[in-house]
Amino acid sequence: MAENTTNTNTDYHRHKKKEEMKQQVITFALMIVFTIIAFAMVNAQLDKLFVIPVLLVLAVVQVGFQLYYFMHMSHKGHEMPALMMYGGAAVAFLTVLTLAVLIWW
């Protein structure tokens, strides 16, 4: 009976690791595609008003991919580091926004 439980547990962990690796490979491929798109847009010398916002969106998506899949922030037990990172990002964003408003006002 114990051998069957151990075998099932091992199969579960193997399947879980396989799914995680599959997600990381897909994410890595998407990040490469986003990078190629960014280089192609800059190389095509498109209008800056179009290129800059698209590059910023691609960059934010890539940061999200890196946090969730490569830094394992989607796993259980990483809530506090995630909270600290998002809190720091929010404070940094508000600081930059505040300074930009003060300068341009």
Image (cartoon, rainbow, N blue to C red):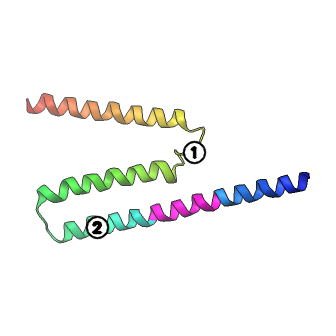
List the residue tagged with mark 1.
75
Q: Residue at x 21, y 67 (%)?
A: 41
Label 1 crowd (10 A; few <14 / some 14-19 / many >=20)? few
Closest to the observer: 52 or 15? 15
List the residue tagged with mark 2.
37
Of badges 2 and 1, the one in the foreground is 1
The correct choice, above or below, for 67 with respect to 103 in the image is below
Instruction: Place residue 39 in its image quadrant.
Output: bottom left
Q: Residue at x 24, y 34 (%)?
A: 96
Q: Of all residues shown, which one is farthest toward the left?
A: 105
Type of amino acid under label 2: Ile
Judged from the image, the secondary structure of the residue bearing numbered disc 2 is helix
Do the numbered discs 2 and 1 sit on residues whose CB atoms are within 8 Å? no
Residue 6 location, x and y as percent?
83, 54
Type of amino acid under label 1: His
The correct choice, above or below, for 5 with respect to 32 in the image is above
Judged from the image, the secondary structure of the residue bearing numbered disc 1 is loop
| Label number found at residue 88 | none
Give the side of residue 82 with respect to residue 55, left or right. right
Residue 22 location, x and y as percent?
55, 63
Label 2 crowd (10 A; few <14 / some 14-19 / many >=20)? some
- Magenta region includes residue 19: yes
**First in residue order: circle 2 vs circle 1:** 2
For the record, the magenta segment spans 17-28
The correct choice, above or below, for 7 with respect to 89 in the image is below
- Magenta region includes residue 48: no
Give the side of residue 48 with respect to residue 11, left or right. left
Residue 21 location, x and y as percent?
58, 61
